[in-house]
Image (cartoon, helix red, strand yellow):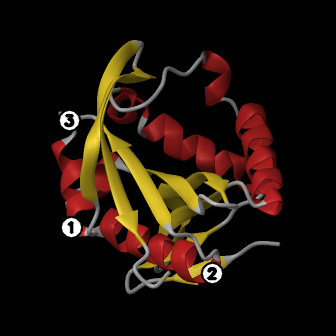
Amino acid sequence: MQKIYETKRLILKTLDNTFANMVLEYYVRNESFLKEWEAGKGKEFYTETFQAAQLDQERMNMEAGTSFRLWLFKKGDESRIIGSVAFNNIVKGAFWSCFLGYKLDEDEVNQGYITEAIQKGIDIMFNEFGLHRIEANIMPRNARSLQVAKKLGFYHEGLAYRYLKINEKWEDHIHMVLLNDNI
């Protein structure tokens, strides 16, 4: 079942495999821009078949309660994806936590869209999912991403050395955390 949320300027949606072509268009349009900040991707990633399978896996993970991804559209233009906000590795039990990941279309940076979308996602994670903690791991050289996290109230909890392999290189990451003060 598709979920749809709104912010002042955005529509945020969970997607099924019928949106594979739109997701593919987003990734093709932003391939060189995102490459610096993401794990390497093979040629198969840039196919509609692969994206349809990914969307199917996302749906299964959301149904299992282990992840939640919202794809971003500007109000008035739902024909073009401009980014996504994902909450992965949702763990309950004693932890009640998840990892945050986000990406935005190169043509839409510095307009506040990703901050607006993440803020809505935080509200969903804390108030609908009842999570206690959201963690974001950000490369020290990613100043824009660090600024977004700080603006949203995340604090610096530590540095993870050679934490993730990004663009074929092991990168340090600053561990940023936001706690749900209502729990």
Circles 3 and 1, Cβ within 8 Å, touching? The answer is no
Residue 34 or 48: which is nearer the viewer? 34
**Which residue is under mark 2?**
128
**Residue 50 in sight here:** yes
Q: Which mark is residue 172?
A: none
- Determine whether 11 is above or below 87 in the image: below
- Determine whether 14 is above or below 119 in the image: above
Q: Amino acid at mark 1?
A: Lys
Q: Quadrant of the N terminus?
A: bottom right
Residue extending furthest toward the top:
168
The residue drawn where x is 29% and y is 26% is 172
Q: Amino acid at mark 2?
A: Glu
Pick whichever of labels 2 and 3 is earlier in the sequence. 2
The residue drawn where x is 82% and y is 57% is 64
Gap in angstroms between the C-alphas marked 2 and 1 = 22 Å
Q: Residues within 10 Å of mark 1 (few under 14, many from 20)?
A: few
Q: Residues within 10 Å of mark 2 (few under 14, many from 20)?
A: few
User: Residue 8, percent across and down?
Assistant: 38, 86
Gap in angstroms between the C-alphas marked 2 and 3 = 31 Å
- Determine whether 43 is above or below 88 in the image: above
Gap in angstroms between the C-alphas marked 3 and 1 = 16 Å
- Indicate the quadrant where residue 171 lies: top left
Pick whichever of labels 3 and 1 is earlier in the sequence. 3
Pick whichever of labels 2 and 1 is earlier in the sequence. 2
Q: Secondary structure at mark 1?
A: helix
Q: Secondary structure at mark 3?
A: loop
Q: Classify residue 138 as left or right of residue 151.
A: right
**Which residue is under mark 3?**
140
**Which residue is under mark 1?**
151
